[in-house]
Image: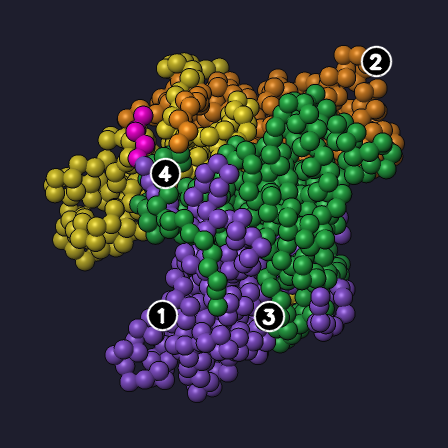
Chain colours: A orange, B yellow, C purple, D green
Amino acid sequence: MKMPEMWETKITKIKPNEIRVRGYRLDELMGQVTFSEAIYLLFTGELPDKKIARLLDAIFISSIDHGVSPPSAQAAIISTSTGAPLNAAVAAGILSINDYHGGAIHNCMNVLQSAIEGLKSKDGIDSVANEVVEGFLQSKNRMPGIGHRVHTDDPRTKKLFELASNAGVAAEGVAMINAIAGAFERRGKILPINVDGAIAAILVDLDLPAELANAFFMIARMPGLCAHAYEEKTTQKPMRYIQISFHTYSGHEDREIEERK
Amino acid sequence: MKMPEMWETKITKIKPNEIRVRGYRLDELMGQVTFSEAIYLLFTGELPDKKIARLLDAIFISSIDHGVSPPSAQAAIISTSTGAPLNAAVAAGILSINDYHGGAIHNCMNVLQSAIEGLKSKDGIDSVANEVVEGFLQSKNRMPGIGHRVHTDDPRTKKLFELASNAGVAAEGVAMINAIAGAFERRGKILPINVDGAIAAILVDLDLPAELANAFFMIARMPGLCAHAYEEKTTQKPMRYIQISFHTYSGHEDREIEERK
Amino acid sequence: MKMPEMWETKITKIKPNEIRVRGYRLDELMGQVTFSEAIYLLFTGELPDKKIARLLDAIFISSIDHGVSPPSAQAAIISTSTGAPLNAAVAAGILSINDYHGGAIHNCMNVLQSAIEGLKSKDGIDSVANEVVEGFLQSKNRMPGIGHRVHTDDPRTKKLFELASNAGVAAEGVAMINAIAGAFERRGKILPINVDGAIAAILVDLDLPAELANAFFMIARMPGLCAHAYEEKTTQKPMRYIQISFHTYSGHEDREIEERK
Amino acid sequence: MKMPEMWETKITKIKPNEIRVRGYRLDELMGQVTFSEAIYLLFTGELPDKKIARLLDAIFISSIDHGVSPPSAQAAIISTSTGAPLNAAVAAGILSINDYHGGAIHNCMNVLQSAIEGLKSKDGIDSVANEVVEGFLQSKNRMPGIGHRVHTDDPRTKKLFELASNAGVAAEGVAMINAIAGAFERRGKILPINVDGAIAAILVDLDLPAELANAFFMIARMPGLCAHAYEEKTTQKPMRYIQISFHTYSGHEDREIEERK
């Protein structure tokens, strides 16, 4: 038997009847901060200021669901249809979040961070953006965070950039992805910045590490996956033939948010 | 080829450049509601009032992390140690959330709901609670939501019940689990209501379906799983021998929440 | 820190330069036994005789693949389409093997074992089978292992029973499922014993525990999941709209097995 | 609704009462070929000759289990301990098969294939091997398939190479990994070719694609994961503190394979 080595964790301290996350008592955080603020604390070690907190809520909400057609929702629905418990269905969904779905946030952050690095030695943001775009066009790869298979003008992007700007967060990341979209446009490619690209730009400006990018998407989408699995289980027969395009929306009609208590 | 049948979803409506969750435009929800409120909307079809919103935040925070020793954290850490991407590590964690870890919320809700049902035909809450406790003692099964392997007085429970009471939510569910803990105590078994039991009682009082119970735990714990996977990846060597008990906490020292901007 | 307790395993012994499975040196097993024989050894602690070995091969082959439409294949394909590595795609597939797909072997074994138990106190196999069928008809549940959404006369079943009979394995399990199918028929329900039912009956007659039933199906189907994930990755574009029914088979034309070297 | 496009699969053709894998009727394969042969058929489109068939069995057996300490076994055990059904436990195990555990086969195949490519323009195998080794030493990366944390002389490797040689399969792949191990030795690094390296070399010589490498390991280890999950479920209490090093082997004593019927 190998003698075990001691190892360290900096996240949470557990003592009988006391749980501290990043130094704060968990039961003191409860009631005083929002879930989004606690997530930021867990990841960065510090609580965000209130403006950033609201921006984080908007980020999570922006990706909370996108109907039944994203592959992660399909996988959760198919797994549920075979009788899977909720956690297995959701895990199947999470395993369908990769480079081409959800994972774009991570890859887009990498592109933006290296482009911003390039700013130091280049003539200006448009010149850097041109170079990025040329690289993608020549390699025939898609730029992650740009373009969408459904939306030509992603409403989530506009709102995220507006909130990031109001929070004083929007900086080089947001500027760079806009410059890149502009460079595509000058080449005749009118492509929207999608929600992944918008989140990537903002996470860059929040100084969050790219390795955590997919965490934001997975946390955001988790409730959506649960909702679809639950709907499948409670409204459909097991092992039905699921043809994903052949669905209609039969939920609440369009409405506006009213003032709440 | 079987001709596909049309099927229905009530959750989210997707049109080009318009996403509506339960009737509301997603970009209108962004900036106006918190992530927790959006989750409640997704699950129930309606936005919660502000008091319930704060309670939901507390529920999610109560289960956001419990250090490296819960099986779900261990699985995420072990998977990461083999070189897993974040989504695979987190999925391994989620697959370790079952009846004996996390799943207690679901099972406890079932117990509480059927006990509350029993109130209609029985003499009073203590009599029903006695019967529940006798049932568990005779079958030698553990009552889900009661007892903890670390905490004798779970600080999260106290806080959740306080917030549920302030929000005007605490009702039969909270009363019943307290009655059950009391019935155990009268039999010489002094066992704390654990955080799963507290959440179960409150979800009963919020009229949420037991089938969604594990969704609350999984959503809550997701950020914790991500944080542990990220810590493992960025601070440890791959394929180390991980002996879970042999760890120390080396993070931020104890501190109190200060007023924030 | 809790002091760790020692615990025991009976499966494999590891020493430097020596690996023993159930007492046998792994490198001695290699070259002398088939994969199926090694699996049986791992599960039961003993090597099977040669007749049973051939039957096990037939069991695994019977469930090795069923095209792109089973939910497990769909999940593996969808996950791959998002850029998943092979293990994540396969895990998504495995998470779609539950009560209504693959899991029938387990549930059917339970039914057969309790029916066989009933033989001790009942008048005969047909009387027991009648009772089983009445139970399912009254509860409107489907009998696991009986019926198929594609095949009316499952060719795998016939072959498995033939091989089980030749191997001298077919006994009460096979007799009971045939009696149950007969009892359905007497009630006007002509339903085939499907491959899950056939495997269940044979595993009962091999005295294998029902808790390992799904292991047989998952081991068998694993190569199929890998093959579909690999085909998707190497022949299709990422994030295509996958409508599972809209496929055609374009592989090797029908052929017969020729004598091999 | 997007109109679905037809798509093609070349693996399995399903008609009512007829299942054909790569052109062969599944029920004809049953009883005539081994599971390993059927796997090879599924992956390559053709049945292997009998010598290769025996080699494939040996490959699968070589990786069928390695006790409780590999991360994939740990994850399966931990997940089971929380009450997971078999498929979830096994999926957690599979998600712990990545670059540093199991995934070495894939990476080693890539190294070997590009080294063999280099043979065309270089002076000889030792010169190419030297270059490969220098590359790894300079980058301080580990060469996949070389070295083991337990074994200094991996018994599985010796046997696999012997069988590959007898089958007439051993060619450039096996020669190259031996040359690489030799080049390490000349630099004072005496490292065994591990089982992953041996399998990688043989799969190269069998002309199998590197993208399927992990399939071989996952298929091989699946029974091991099932066996550990089953042992945990049937012999241990839920939610025990599992310290992986603190185990002993208490299974069958050492024995030799006897002649079988």
Q: Are marks 2 and 1 on the same chain?
A: no
Percent x, y of residue C137: 40, 77
Q: Looking at the rendering, which quadrant does residue A97 occupy?
A: top right
Mark 4 packing: few (<14 Cα in 10 Å), some, or many (20+)?
some
Circle 4 sits on which residue?
D247
**Relative vertical location of residue C126 with respect to residue C212 in this rendering, above or below:** below
Q: Looking at the rendering, which quadrant does residue A169 occupy?
A: top right
Give, as a single range, the part of the protein colored magenta: C1-5
Q: CA distance from mark 3 to mark 2?
A: 69 Å
Q: CA distance from mark 3 to mark 4?
A: 40 Å
Callout 3 secondary element: loop
Callout 2 secondary element: loop
**Relative vertical location of residue C33 with respect to residue A221 in this rendering, above or below:** below
Circle 1 sits on which residue?
C113
Tell me what residue is drawn at x 42 percent, y 52 percent. D255
Circle 2 sits on which residue?
A123
Tell me what residue is drawn at x 24 percent, y 31 percent. B152
